[in-house]
Amino acid sequence: MVILRTYNNYLSANLDLSRLKDAGIHAFLRDEAISTLIAAGVNGIKLVVPETEAHTASAMLGIMEDERKEL
């Protein structure tokens, strides 16, 4: 498993997770409950994917980031 990103924001983490899952990527969030309870999230919420899907997921996250910048 590979940690692709770490978030301090619950909504951003779940938005990216949902988009990856919709595309068929087997992603999940680690430390979501702990980070949500603690204001700044001690270690943050980690977006995790299987190593075999890391390249595709990383590319998708880059595209999603570009789309957000355009808005």
Image (tube, grey):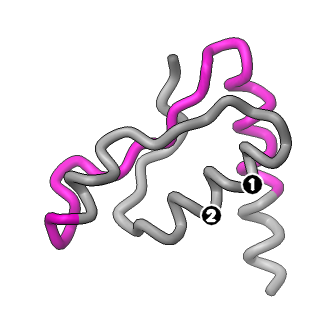
Magenta highlight range: 37-63
Which of the 4 image quadrants contains residue 21?
top right
Task: Find out whether residue 57 is within the magenta segment.
Answer: yes
Vertical arrangement, residue 26 with respect to residue 30, above or below: above
Q: Secondary structure at mark 2?
A: helix
Left of 7 or right of it: where is 57?
right
Residue depicted at x 81% and y 48%:
22
Q: Amino acid at mark 1?
A: Arg
Left of 31 or right of it: where is 6?
right
Q: Position of residue 43 (x, y in %)?
A: 22, 47
Residue identified by numbered label 2: 15
Q: Residue placed farthest to the top in the image? A: 52
Vertical arrangement, residue 68 with respect to residue 25, above or below: below
Q: Are marks 1 and 2 in contact (CB under 8 Å)?
A: yes
Left of 25 or right of it: where is 44?
left
Residue identified by numbered label 1: 19
Vertical arrangement, residue 25 with respect to residue 46, above or below: above
Towards the viewer: 4 or 22:
22
Q: Amino acid at mark 2?
A: Leu
